[in-house]
Image (cartoon, coloured by chain):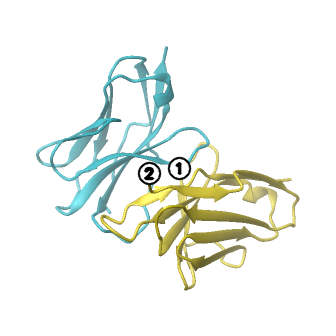
Amino acid sequence: GAVVSQHPSWVICKSGTSVKIECRSLDFQATTMFWYRQFPKQSLMLMATSNEGSKATYEQGVEKDKFLINHASLTLSTLTVTSAHPEDSSFYICSAREEAGLREQYFGPGTRLTVT
Amino acid sequence: DAKTTQPPSMDCAEGRAANLPCNHSTISGNEYVYWYRQIHSQGPQYIIHGLKNNETNEMASLIITEDRKSSTLILPHATLRDTAVYYCIVRAANSGYALNFGKGTSLLVTP
């Protein structure tokens, strides 16, 4: 149980275009999901906290108008990178927090974004 | 959440036990010690967590000192597939906040 999926697993896009990444909790409901970004040889850095039915909370330094987060249901959150640039190339990872028990976080497999 | 300190890298021979240390001297009484690992280009994988007693599961053992200021993750028979970055994270139970990842320990298991 407690599986989180991401789609796509990798994507290549041209500079200036937008890319949408989906994060789904497959067998549990998640009111809260988190989005992380990881650059090569660095640790995961939290970008934002996504709450179902409300606006996301962004970490300092993360542009909310560039990284659009939508959490329209209890099993799906999306991250849209708008007007992508090469410096947005990174590994994007989501996690979903279960609402029962110890409210553990489960991670998706990640999405590799390359902007050319 | 309390801060943790881990060595940046470690090596281990295949088949031997890998012992990964973590210092968390400012841990509070209600904070758990969690261990995750991240294999290259994959999402983090939960390994184990504990409060004050030693814990064991099919993946690893967690030894927490009596004063709870440090812990050791033990992989009893390391394989090449255990090569990964291992993260020790301290957080309160039922925390609504995201897990904060430090730099972790890069474990290399060699043949």
Residue B52 is situated, as x and y percent measured from the top left of the image, at 16, 50
- Residue placed furthest toward the bottom: A54
Q: Front-most of B42 and B72?
A: B42
Identify the residue under disc 2. B102
- Image vertical order of residue A82 relative to residue A27, above or below: below
Residue A42 is situated, as x and y percent measured from the top left of the image, at 57, 47
B81 to the left or right of B19: right
Q: Which secondary structure lies at badge 2?
A: loop
Q: How many marks?
A: 2
Among the chains pictured, the one given yellow colouring is A
Q: Front-most of B14 and A85?
A: B14
Identify the residue under disc 1. A43
Residue B48 is situated, as x and y percent measured from the top left of the image, at 32, 45
The reply to whether discs 2 and 1 touch (Cβ–Cβ < 8 Å) is: yes
Look at the image and tell me whether residue B78 can be seen: yes
Q: Picture quarter containing residue B63?
A: top left
Among the chains pictured, the one given cyan colouring is B
- Image vertical order of residue B95 relative to residue B51, above or below: below
Residue type beneath disc 1: Ser
Q: Picture quarter containing residue A60?
A: bottom right
**Label 1: how many Cα within 10 Å (few below 14, some 14–19, many 20+):** some
Q: Residue at x 73, y 59 (%)?
A: A88
Q: Residue at x 59, y 42 (%)?
A: A41
Q: Which secondary structure lies at badge 1?
A: loop
Q: Which residue is drawn at 69% across and 51% down?
A: A9
- Specify the subunit that label 1 lies on: A
A73 to the left or right of B106: right
